[in-house]
Image (cartoon, rainbow, N blue to C red):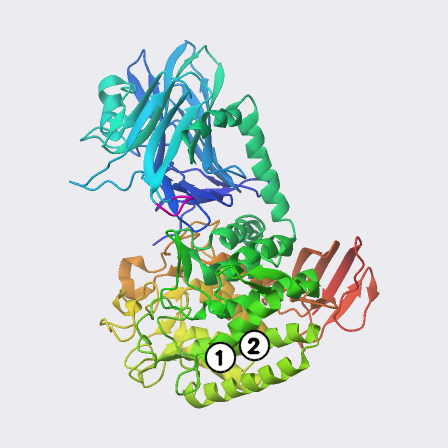
């Protein structure tokens, strides 16, 4: 497999520009507000949906296309580059932070199609600009089309019982659909599509526009009619198709604006035209761009790897921002939102705090936390680790902001009762500690972080070594926060709990050379030398370092085992060897093909955790290697392939044959978010404490000169690193003068120039 470039970064580093339509797979961009998320590929494919406060969802858009018809010449094409067999004179897709613009030229017509999600509302906007580059007038039609599942997915011989119409009184297409949205009981809501130009045609019925035997790339309405059929829809599959006329003189341009949205009542549709008034869509787009830039401005890096600089300073931070609100998009994962808010806090702790409070409100008052919020209800799904992440996130936010008073802020539980942030953490930590198996380790129940180990402890006897180690890390963070409140008795009891758990881990979780992952209900050891499969698991080793549960010398030896057993050209395997047969006493991951997903693949979020551990161990050379393997454009060790502006959940390994080095899904993973945190907090070593910002760096060996700019509690630090001391010593100059120790001076409103010699 040869690595190929399909685009490049824009000159200002704010966009990734795709110059070839046929990438190896759809290369997506995501856009969002608190209630709506949409994504779109370089040829217009993608979804858009809204959700209410309990994640009841309306799947408003399941695909998009813009068709341009030429009435005189009786031809048509799309404004998004499809079909692939068609030739275009020009094509370009610009993925930006909160928007995507596809530009093209074909048949003497040039166009731009921009899609974005505004900062508020259950809707998305399209802006389409057409230019006639011919020497003669052009009589065109412009049709905005969106497939939808607001009426439910279409199934052969199934029912779609909703309806759709054009209503001149509201100047829009509307769909009347059944949903529990916003009420959490059966009811009717409305989806709509509207334009800022007069309607020249419409279709609400998929069989009228696409046709019974047509496709989205070849709609029967265009093949036979070169335009919409003005179809209503009654108890058939719905769609949105809205046509505007476009007559252009030579060199003339015209801009069209469309809006697709969802409301609770039909009388709410007509007022939505205000968002299409002259200049309004462009202002909404500007607001999105300005807001996203402001939300991401807290940290900027400059390393010797220019591609890393571009990706980190744009899409990695942007993805972290989105994840802190939308987690894994297809569901609102509790642990996922906690983790992503902890990562967000490295560059925007204020926003992380506001979002984290919303996440906390779904915690149970006994301390337990659910797996996800989805389909109108809180879903536990038998997962036990979610409560552990609460304290890690809270600790980072409190330390970044330097506000111990946050610990006393009242936040509701999911039953409506309230307690302080500190009490939320205490109950979470103690709930998990008391959820012990006979060996004193925390029960795994239906899964810890590993969603695929979901059958290992359903009988209540299996335990998680990894979660017990992670609990130790969270417990230490809890004690640090308890110290801010002077809770000495609580600190004493939790110190004893921590030591007891550590001893239990050493007695029941240590495998002679490294730590196991789990023990199932039958007593089968998973991630052990005596295991029939998966004899070693990466996560417990990295978290043992992060939790500091053993002396550094022991932890370094563990990582020598990781080096020799888990490394491959594409990265560090999550585990090895793979399960080759399904084991219903372990979990779903044993059914996954070897070398993919959680079954011996290179899983990238754990590699980001490994980066943190390597920094704590001072393994500069291995840190460089792990980072090189993780990034898709770096082929020092093995050739990988993927979108160069985002990251993925895994790389397939050599056991998959043709798939080796090819990534899994992009965006819907915490890899980029954890990498952001690893770089800021561990590589550059910017450690927030109540006293101020400490510097404890461990840089990759190739970063001889690098820098980072960080906003911190109202002041700005520009920090330049010079890696030159092989003995591990560190010397710091602030505004040209040396300081004692590694705590930077702080005065709100000031700017500091810092030089670090390490």
Residue 601 coordinates in the image, percent (x, y):
35, 66
Q: Judging from the image, what secondary structure is the residue with disc 1 in?
A: helix
Q: Tell me which secondary structure the magenta stretch mostly adopts.
A: loop
Observer-nearest of 334 and 284 = 334
Instruction: From the viewer's side, name the closer residue of 422 and 91.
Output: 422
Is any part of residue 562 visible from this angle? no
Secondary structure of the residue carrying tag 2 is: helix
* Quarter in which the N terminus is drawn: bottom left
Residue 744 magenta-highlighted: no
What is the quadrant of residue 62 in the picture? top left
Is 734 placed left or right of 260 in the picture?
right
Do the residues under discs 2 and 1 have CB atoms within 8 angstroms?
Answer: yes
134 to 309, vertically: above or below: above
Q: Tell me the number on the disc at residue 95.
A: none
Q: What residue sits right under mark 1 in the picture?
A: 433
Which one is in front, 229 or 299?
A: 229
Camera-side residue of 211 and 541: 211
Q: Residues within 10 Å of mark 1 (few under 14, many from 20)?
A: many
Which residues are the magenta region?
A: 181-185
Where does label 2 land, which residue? 475
Nearest to the eye among marks 2 and 1: give it. Answer: 1
Marks 2 and 1, how far apart at CA: 10 Å
Query: Residue at horizontal 18%, vertical 31%?
Result: 213
The residue at the far right in this view is: 737
Which quadrant holds residue 123?
Answer: top left
- Please provide percent x and percent y for residue 316: 53, 52
């Amino acid at each position: 497999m040869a690595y190929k470039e399909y685009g490049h970064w824009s000159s200002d580093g704010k966009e990734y520009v795709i110059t070839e339509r046929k990438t190896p797979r759809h290369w997506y961009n995501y856009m969002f507000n608190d209630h709506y998320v949409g994504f779109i590929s370089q040829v217009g494919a993608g979804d858009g949906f809204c959700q209410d406060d309990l994640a009841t969802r309306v799947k408003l858009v399941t695909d998009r296309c813009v068709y341009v018809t030429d009435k005189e010449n009786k031809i048509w094409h799309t404004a998004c580059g499809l079909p692939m067999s068609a030739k275009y004179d020009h094509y370009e897709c610009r993925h930006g932070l909160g928007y995507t613009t596809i530009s093209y030229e074909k048949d003497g017509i040039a166009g731009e199609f921009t899609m974005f999600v505004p900062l508020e509302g259950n809707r998305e906007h399209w802006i389409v600009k057409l230019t006639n580059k011919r020497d003669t007038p052009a009589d065109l039609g412009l049709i905005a089309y969106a497939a939808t599942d607001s009426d439910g997915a279409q199934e052969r011989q199934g029912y779609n019982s909703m309806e759709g119409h054009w209503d001149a009184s509201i100047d829009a297409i509307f769909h009347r659909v059944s949903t529990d949205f916003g009420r959490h009981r059966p009811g009717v809501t409305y989806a709509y599509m509207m334009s800022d130009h007069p309607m020249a045609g419409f279709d609400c019925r998929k069989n009228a526009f696409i046709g019974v035997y047509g496709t989205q790339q070849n709609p029967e309405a265009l093949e036979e009619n070169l335009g919409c059929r003005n179809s209503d829809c009654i108890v058939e599959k719905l769609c949105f198709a809205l046509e505007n006329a476009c007559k252009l003189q030579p060199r003339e341009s015209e801009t069209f604006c469309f809006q697709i949205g969802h409301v609770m009542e039909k009388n709410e549709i007509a007022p939505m035209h205000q968002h299409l008034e002259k200049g309004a869509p462009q202002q909404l787009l500007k607001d999105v761009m300005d807001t996203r830039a402001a939300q991401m401005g807290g940290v900027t890096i400059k390393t010797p790897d220019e591609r890393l600089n571009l990706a980190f300073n744009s899409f990695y931070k942007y993805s972290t921002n989105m994840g802190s609100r939308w987690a894994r998009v297809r569901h609102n994962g509790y642990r996922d939102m906690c983790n992503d808010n902890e990562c967000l806090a490295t560059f925007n702790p204020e926003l992380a705090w506001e979002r984290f409070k919303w996440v906390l409100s779904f915690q149970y008052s006994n301390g337990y936390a659910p797996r996800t919020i989805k389909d109108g209800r809180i879903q536990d799904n038998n997962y036990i680790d979610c409560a552990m992440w609460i304290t890690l996130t809270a600790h980072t936010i409190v330390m970044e902001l330097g506000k111990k008073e946050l610990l006393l802020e009242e936040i509701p539980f999911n039953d409506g009762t309230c307690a302080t942030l500190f009490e939320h953490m205490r109950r979470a930590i103690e709930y998990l500690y008391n959820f012990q198996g006979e060996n004193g380790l925390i029960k795994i129940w239906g899964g810890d972080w590993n969603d695929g180990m979901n059958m290992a402890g359903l009988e209540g006897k299996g335990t998680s070594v990894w979660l017990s180690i992670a609990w130790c890390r969270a417990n230490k963070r809890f004690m640090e926060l308890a110290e801010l409140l002077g809770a000495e008795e609580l600190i004493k009891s939790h110190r004893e709990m921590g030591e007891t758990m550590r001893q239990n881990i050493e007695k029941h979780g240590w495998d002679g050379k490294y730590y196991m992952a789990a023990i199932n209900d039958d007593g089968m050891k998973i991630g052990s030398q005596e295991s029939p499969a998966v004899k070693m698991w990466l996560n417990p080793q990295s978290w043992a370092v992060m939790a500091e549960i053993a002396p550094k010398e022991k932890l370094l030896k563990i990582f020598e085992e990781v080096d020799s057993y888990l490394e491959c050209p594409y990265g560090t395997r999550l585990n090895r060897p793979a399960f080759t047969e399904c084991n219903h006493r372990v979990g779903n991951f044993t059914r996954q093909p070897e070398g993919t997903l959680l079954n011996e693949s290179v899983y990238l979020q754990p590699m980001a955790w490994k980066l943190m551990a390597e920094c704590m161990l001072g393994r500069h050379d291995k840190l460089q290697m792990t980072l090189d393997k993780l990034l898709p454009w770096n082929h020092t060790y093995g050739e990988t392939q993927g979108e160069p502006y985002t990251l993925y959940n895994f790389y397939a390994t050599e056991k998959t044959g043709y798939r080796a080095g090819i990534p899994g899904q992009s965006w819907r993973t915490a890899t980029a978010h954890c990498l952001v945190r690893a770089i800021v907090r561990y590589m550059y070593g910017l450690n927030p404490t109540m006293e101020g910002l400490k510097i404890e760096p461990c840089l990759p060996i190739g970063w001889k000169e690098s820098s980072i700019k960080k906003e911190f509690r109202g002041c700005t630090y520009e920090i330049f690193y010079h890696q030159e001391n092989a003995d591990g010593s560190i010397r710091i100059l602030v505004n040209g003068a040396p300081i004692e120790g590694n705590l930077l001076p702080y005065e709100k409103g000031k700017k500091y120039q810092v030089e670090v010699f390490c």
